[in-house]
Image (cartoon, grey):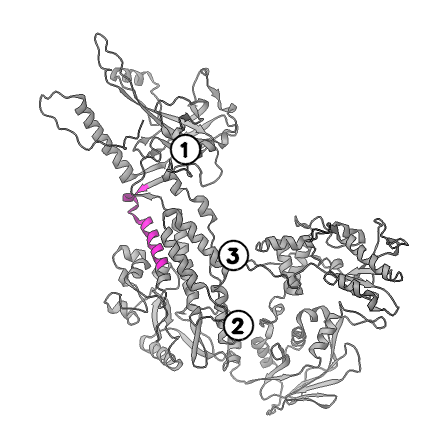
Amino acid sequence: MAAKLTTITGQYHSYVADQVLTHYQLNETIDYFDDQNRLSRVFLTGTGIVCGFQVSTNPGYSTVTITQGNGITTDGDLIKLFVKPSTPADIALATALKQKLISIDIPKIDYKSYKVFDIDKGNYPHFKSGTAMLPMWELLPEKTGALETGESLLTSFPDLKNHVVLLYLENYTKEATLCDETDCSNKGGEEVFNLRVLVVSQATANIIISKTSTPQRDPLYSKYDVFDKYSMLDELGVKKVIPTFNNTSTAAKIKQLFNTVVNDVSFKSELLANLATVLIPFGYVTQLAAINTRFNALFTIDPNNIPADIHYRYDLLKDIVATYKELKDLFLQLKSECNPPIGSFPKHLLLGLVEENNRYKNYRHQFYKASALDHNKTFSNFDSLVRRLKGILDNYLVNANSVKITPSKTIGKLGTKSVPYYYNVDDNLLHAWDFEKSTLYNHQANFSYHTTNLLNSDYIKTPLSFCIDDHDFYRIEGYLNDSVDDVKAFLIAKRIEFGLDFDFYIMDVVENAADLKILFNTNYSFEHKAGVKKGGTLLLLKSGTTLITDFAIDGKINPDSGLGCCTIMGCLYPWISSLRYINNLSRSLRGSRSDKVDLPTHYKLSVKKYTINGVNLITDRVLIDIPLDQLLARRLHVVMETLNNRFPTGLLFDFIEEEKKLRIMRLEKDTFEFEVQDITLSRNAPTYTFTQNGVTKNGKVYSSNKITCAIMNSHKAEIYKKIHAYYDPINKDDDDFGRFNDDWDKFEYLRSQLRFHEETKSFIRFPKIFDDYYTIPVIYNNQQNEDTTVAEELLNIAQEIVRIDDNYNEIYIGGDWTSGNYVNTTMQSYYLENYTDTNDELVLFMNLRTKIHNESKVSKYMIHIDTTRNVKLSDFEELFTKYAKKAEFYFYKPTNGNFIKIEQNRFSKDGSIKKRVLVNKQKITKSPITKKVTKPVIKKTPVTKRTPKKPGDTK
C-alpha cells in the first residue's frame, strides 16, 4: 500500500439539511482531515522516535522487552505500543460497539516467542528486494498456554542479540463481507492497522535503509546517520608559538617561528579533511571547494620568502580552527528537516539492536524535528558558521598602515569577540560573524578595527570612550606599516586618554638582545595574541625601523628584574681546548685506540685559582671531571654547565655556538682571575689564566681582549646568584640537553620497556652470552640475501678476520650491542611504518635515541680485535670497505665496559664457523652498577591529532 501522504485530499464538500450522503462525500471528508492531521505531525512536529521504545533483553536472551514510547512515521502515523482488551467488561464493550478497542496505558511489553514473518498484507515496498520479501521474524508477546504452530521460544533464535528490532504498522483494506438478511453494516471495506514487532538481521536492515542505492530507500536516516563520522573527527588545536631569546634574535627567525606552525603540511591536510567530513554530508560541496582553494593559497608559503604578515596568517589559522570546533559541536545536533521525504520510513520505525552496549544506538531512527520546534536555529547556526569560514578566508586582507586599539574578549566563542583588522569587514562577513547578533538583526553592532560598515553609533565606532566591563582584552593591530615612533606615541597617548590598563615595551631584537634574554628567561608565558589582556604587558618586537610582531603576557613586568643596580659585561675568549681536540677526545670512545696507553674516559680540568675582586672562591685545587660520552653528545655546553653548577656564586660561563668561543659574564666593574689546566692527558699541561683583560698561557699572552674595568672591593655573591638566575644558558636552543635534563632517565626507561614491546619482546635486550644474539634477526632489503641473525652476521665478520690472519682470534663485540641500546632492522622497519604513533614506546625510544645520540639508523657493530702486533691496515682494507655501513673495527683490547667475546673454539682450523657453542660474556672491568629502572614522567601533548614529517635516513 502506498503512503497516504503520497497524494492527499485537497478539499471536501459541506453538507446541507436532509442531504443523502454518498460514500464519496463521507470518505472525502474523512480523508481530508486525516491528511491534515498527518501533515501537521510530519511538517509541524517532526518524524522519528520522540521518546521511549527502548529495547532490552535478559541475560539468557529468553525475553525481549520494549518500553512504551511515541513515534511518528514519515507518512504521519503516530505509533504507540498497545494491547487488546483482556477484562470481561472491556471485551463486552468492544462487542457492543462493534469496534476493536485497544489499550495504550502500559509501561512495556515482554516478548518471549517468535515466528517467521513472510506474509505482508500491507505489501510494504521497503521490505522487498525486487519482488521477493526480505527475511524477517515477528516477536510475539508473552502469553499463557502452549505455543501455536510455527511459533518458537526466543531461546532458540540464533544470535538474537545482534539482530535489529523494528516496529511495522501493517496497513491494508480488508474486503467487505456480504450482507445477511438483517444486517449490512459490514458492507464497506475495513481499514486495518496491525502494529507488528519484527526482528531482522543487520544485513537486512542495511537493505531497508539502503544507504548506497539510488534513490535511497531511507534518505532521512542516511543523511543524519553521522555518528561514525563524528566519532572520527579530530580534536584540533593550533600549536602555541613560544618565544625564546634564540628563536627571536632576528626578524627571519621570528617569521620562521610562526611559519613552522602555519606551514605544517600534515596539520593543514588534517584540518581540511575534517572540514570535508563535517560539510559534505549536508551538501556544502561547492563551498568546501572554494574553502580549499583559498586555504591553500594563503597557507602554502615558501620558507625562503616568508611574508611579513605571517603572524596574522597564524591568527587566521586560529580563527579557522575555532570555527571548525563550533561546526563540529553542531554536526551531531543537526536533526531538523523542513520538508522530510515522505518515503523514508512511511510505515516503520527502527528501534536498534536487541543488545546495544554503546551509548549511541545504531540502526535507530532519531527524532528529526520540524523547523517549527527547532525555530530553524541549529541548521541556521551551522549555515552561518560555514558562511563565516568561507568569509574569513575570502576576506583576509592586511593593508592597514596605522595602529589602533579595539576592545575584545579573552574567552568565549569567536563570534563574541571583535572582528580582527586582517579582514575586509563587509556586510556579508559581519552577518556571518556572530550568529546570535544576526538573529536579532544587529550584526552591525560588532566591534572591529574597520568601522565603515558598522552601526553608526559612537559606542560601536569608538568603544574605548565607554564602559566596557565585559571586554577584557585590547586588540592592538595595524602597526606593520606604521613607524616605530608613531606607534610608541600612539600607545602612550591612548593609555592616558582612555585610562587603558596595560603596559608595553618596544624592543629591538639586536639592540636589546641582553634585555630580551632576561625577559624571556624570567617570563615563560609570552604568547602572540594580536593584543594584550587588561592588566597585562604587550611586547612589540622590531628590527631597526621595522616592527615585526607582538607578544603578550598576563600581568605587569618589573623592568628592573632585580638587576637594575648593575651592568653586566660579557666577554668572548678562546677556550683552552680546541674543538678538534674535544671532538677527537670524545670520539675516542669509538675510535682506534693505542695498544700502549689506556685512553681516558673523562675530560678533566684542574681549577688552580679563582678570585673575584680579590676574594678567593676556592682554597685548594678543584677537579672538574666530565664523562666523555656527555662531551660527545653536548660538546662544550656540558663543560660550561658543569663549571656553573660547581661555582654557583662565580662567573657565568657560556659557550657561544656561532662564535665557537667561551663567553664569561660578570659585573662590569668587577675583576677576576680564573686559572685552569686541562689534565685529561697530562698533569704537565699548560696553565691558562683568564682575567677581565684577556687570557694567558703559562704567563704569556694567549689572547688579548683588553677590557677597561674599574675595580670594586668585594665579591657580591647575591648579585652573582641573580646573574645565574637570569642569564643561565640552560634554555639555549642549540643545547636541548640543558632543557630536558630527564631525557636520559626516559631513555633508560624506554630501553627497558622494549623487553615487553610486541615487536621486540622476543629479542634479548641485554645480551649476556653470545648465543643471545641468535634471538635478534637481521632482515635484508636486498632480496638476494636471506634473512639471518645478528649472531650469524657477527660470526661471518669474525670468520673473515681470522681468514686474513689467524692470529687475530681474540674478537669482542661491544657498544650498543652489549649496552642494550641497539636498533636492529626489524625495529627500524617498524619505526618507519609507525613513526606517527607517539604513544608507541618503541617509536618514543627511536625518537629519543636520535635526539640524545644523534643516531637514526640500525646500530653498527663495534668490533674489537685484541692484538699486540703491529697491524698492517692494508690487509683489512677490503674488509673495512665491505662492512663500512655495518661495523667499526678497533685493534686493541677492550679495557672499559661490557664486551662479549667470540671464543677461539668458534672456528675450525679451516676457518669455518662451528655450530652454536655457548660462550660466556667477558666483563673486562668492573661493570657499572645497574640502576633500578623507574618510569619517568613522559609528558604527552593532547593536541591535536597530526602527521609529522617522515624521518630521514641520515645518521
Q: Quadrant of residue 10?
A: top left
Query: Whole-percent x and y of residue 386?
Result: 36, 54
| Mark drawn on residue 247 | 2
Marks 2 and 3, how far apart at CA: 23 Å
| Residue 396 among those drawn in magenta | no
Q: Which residues are magenta?
A: 369-390
Badge 1 or badge 2: first in the primary sequence: 1
Per the image, label 2 sits on a secondary structure element best described as helix
Per the image, label 3 sits on a secondary structure element best described as loop
User: Hey, which residue is sitting farthest top in the picture?
Assistant: 181
Q: Is residue 116 left or right of residue 28?
A: right
| Mark drawn on residue 946 | 3
Decide which of 47, 949 is in the foreground and name it: 949
Viewport quadrant of the N terminus? top left
Q: Is residue 73 left or right of residue 563?
A: left
Question: Principal SS element in the magenta part?
Answer: helix
